[in-house]
Image (spheres, rainbow, N blue to C red):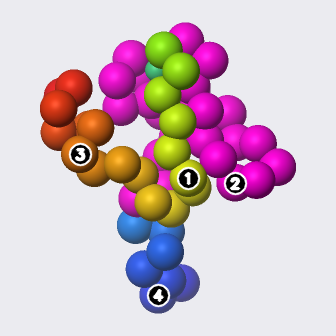
Amino acid sequence: MGSNVEMFKLTTCPKCKSDLKTNNNGIQVCNVCEYWTKQGTARLNSITIFE
Ligand SMILES: [Zn+2]
């Protein structure tokens, strides 16, 4: 509660809408299009480009 770190946490791939997997390093990876983002720091530039 009240944590700004959770702002950009994603559950689905912003590119292909598939489920993201989170590995042990906190990296969220899409197995379909190979998009990845560090949990809590979604790459907003990529989201904008592919939206
Ligand atoms: Zn994807």
Spatial CA span between label 2 and label 4:
20 Å
Disc 2 target residue: 26
- Disc 1: CA contacts within 10 A as few (<14), some (14-19) or many (>=20): some
- Compared with residue 39, is residue 10 higher up or lower down, i.e. above or below? above
Point out the tag, 3 or 4, that comes first from the N-terminus.
Answer: 4
Disc 4 target residue: 2
Disc 3 target residue: 45
Q: Does residue 16 appear to the left or right of 36 in the view shown?
A: left
Q: Amino acid at mark 1?
A: Lys
Q: Which mark is residue 38?
A: 1
In contact (CB < 8 Å): disc 3 and disc 1? no
Which range is magenta? 8-32
Is 25 contained in the magenta span? yes
Question: Could you tell me which residue is drawn at 39 percent across and 17 percent down?
Answer: 16
Spatial CA span between label 2 and label 3:
20 Å
Q: Does residue 4 appear to the left or right of 28 in the view shown?
A: left
- Disc 4: CA contacts within 10 A as few (<14), some (14-19) or many (>=20): few
* Residue 23 place in picture, x, y as percent: 76, 42
Q: Which mark is residue 48?
A: none
Q: Does residue 49 appear to the left or right of 2 in the view shown?
A: left
| Disc 1 residue: CB within 8 Å of ligand 1 | no
Q: Amino acid at mark 4?
A: Gly
In contact (CB < 8 Å): disc 1 and disc 2? yes
Q: Nearer the viewer, mark 2 or mark 4?
A: 2
Point out the tag, 2 or 4, that comes first from the N-terminus.
Answer: 4
* Residue 19 place in picture, x, y as percent: 57, 26
Question: Could you tell me which residue is drawn at 50 percent across and 62 percent down?
Answer: 40
Spatial CA span between label 3 and label 4:
25 Å
In contact (CB < 8 Å): disc 3 and disc 4? no
Residue lying furthest bottom:
2
Spatial CA span between label 1 and label 2:
6 Å
